Image (tube, rainbow, N blue to C red):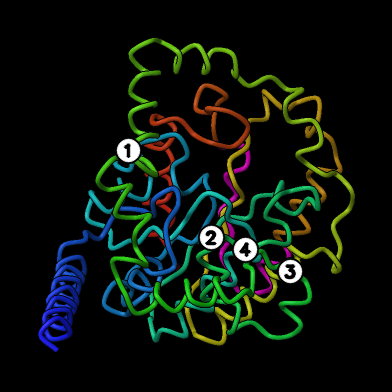
């Protein structure tokens, strides 16, 4: 009996420690300027509460608005916030029209009321070969799937397993903060998904391997062959369907929408996209966004090739220019 009593005391002490640590994580974990590379469903849920969103301008886009290959402070949205504009960056790598729709469904279901939503319309993501054409980011899928209609889900390819293990993982992630945000905690501690990755990155930087890899992967036009599908877009395109549903959702919530035509490196991609078919598709998307009530910001040709890292991601200097353009256009709303 004494052994059982001691065991129960130890168990109670362990639970108390875990509970205390969990409270500490909730209180300590910072509100980040943008999502981490591998943000969790727990962190996403925390980010969408009304206190973080209400009255602000929400950016819900892909890696182009997230700030690909840049530190958070160099991203255009972070620069806007530093300049006093009330913005929230909910963009992430792997965004697309279905992802924007699912994210906004989550945000509105949480009761949040932004001043406006800015999202990008990236023509490459309307290509059936794009990785995000029919898939949602894992954390977004985990939370948003139950909110989607049968018609929404029929257009998407789920990636989350529905095994017992997966259900237990989702349950623990929802009610045990430290467990649910383990990926985010590791990224804050190590600047990477784990200590081993951080150490490897540091070693590569010291050895010059990082620079050699960058030099070996400098963008050339042929790397993007097939990235942009120039087939005429129509109502059956999944990206078009979800763009329309996003616009309808914003109208239903009485929230202003801004659709950015993603800056594109035309000098790099000249042979592939400087053709009438490309412009026809952009015009098609522009008409949909305009008819849906959004203000279209056409930045497709607004940047020089020196402003790009690759086909559609801007350098730090390019993001300075993007921030200035957004500041101008968001403040001149009619």
Which picture quadrant has residue 331?
bottom left
2 vs 4, front mark: 4
Mark 1 and mark 3: Cα distance apart in space? 34 Å
Other residues around mark 4 within 10 Å, as few (<14) / some (14–19) / many (≥20)? many
Sequence-wise, the earlier of marks 2 and 3 is: 2
Residue beneath disc 4: 136
Residue 239 lies left or right of residue 116; in this view the side is: right
2 vs 3, front mark: 3
1 vs 2, front mark: 1
Residue beneath disc 3: 156
Other residues around mark 2 within 10 Å, as few (<14) / some (14–19) / many (≥20)? many
Residue beneath disc 2: 119
Q: Nearer the viewer, residue 108 or 15?
A: 15
| Circle 1/circle 2 CB separation < 8 Å | no
- Please tell me which residue is depicted at 60% across the width and 19% down the height of the picture: 217
Q: Which residues are magenta?
A: 287-302
Other residues around mark 1 within 10 Å, as few (<14) / some (14–19) / many (≥20)? some
| Circle 4/circle 3 CB separation < 8 Å | yes
Sequence-wise, the earlier of marks 1 and 3 is: 3
Spot occupied by residue 226 in the image (x, y as percentages of width and height): 81, 36
Instruction: Describe the element under mark 2 as helix, strand or loop.
Output: strand
Spot occupied by residue 170 in the image (x, y as percentages of width and height): 47, 74
Q: Nearer the viewer, residue 198 or 228?
A: 198
Instruction: Describe the element under mark 1 as helix, strand or loop.
Output: helix
């Amino acid at each position: 009996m004494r052994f059982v009593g001691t065991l129960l005391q130890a168990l109670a002490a362990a639970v108390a420690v875990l509970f205390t640590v969990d409270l500490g994580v909730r209180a300590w974990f910072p509100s980040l300027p943008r999502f981490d590379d591998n943000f969790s469903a727990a962190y996403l849920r925390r980010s969408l509460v009304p206190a973080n969103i209400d009255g602000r301008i929400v950016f819900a886009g892909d890696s182009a608005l997230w700030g690909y290959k840049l530190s958070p402070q160099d991203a255009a949205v972070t620069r806007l916030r530093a300049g006093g504009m009330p913005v929230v960056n909910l963009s992430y790598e792997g965004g697309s029209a279905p992802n924007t729709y699912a994210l906004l469904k989550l945000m509105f279901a949480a009761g949040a009321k932004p001043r406006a939503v800015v999202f990008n319309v990236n023509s490459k993501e309307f290509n059936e070969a794009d990785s995000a054409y029919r898939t949602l980011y894992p954390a977004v899928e985990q939370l948003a799937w139950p909110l989607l209609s049968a018609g929404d889900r029929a257009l998407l390819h789920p990636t989350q397993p529905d095994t017992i293990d997966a259900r237990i993982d989702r349950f623990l992630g929802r009610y045990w903060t430290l467990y649910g945000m383990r990926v985010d905690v590791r990224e804050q501690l190590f600047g990477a998904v784990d200590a081993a990755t951080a150490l490897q990155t540091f070693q590569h930087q010291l050895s010059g391997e990082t620079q050699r890899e960058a030099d070996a992967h400098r963008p050339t036009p042929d790397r993007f062959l097939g990235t942009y599908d120039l087939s005429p877009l129509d109502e059956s395109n999944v990206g078009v369907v979800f763009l329309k549903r996003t616009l309808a959702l914003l109208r239903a919530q009485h929230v202003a929408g801004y659709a950015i035509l993603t800056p594109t490196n035309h000098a790099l991609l000249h042979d592939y996209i400087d053709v009438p078919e490309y412009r026809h598709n952009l015009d098609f998307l522009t008409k949909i966004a305009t008819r849906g009530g959004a203000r279209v910001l056409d930045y497709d040709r607004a940047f020089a090739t020196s402003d790009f890292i690759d086909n559609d991601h801007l350098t730090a200097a390019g993001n300075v220019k993007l921030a200035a353009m957004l500041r101008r256009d968001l403040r001149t709303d009619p």
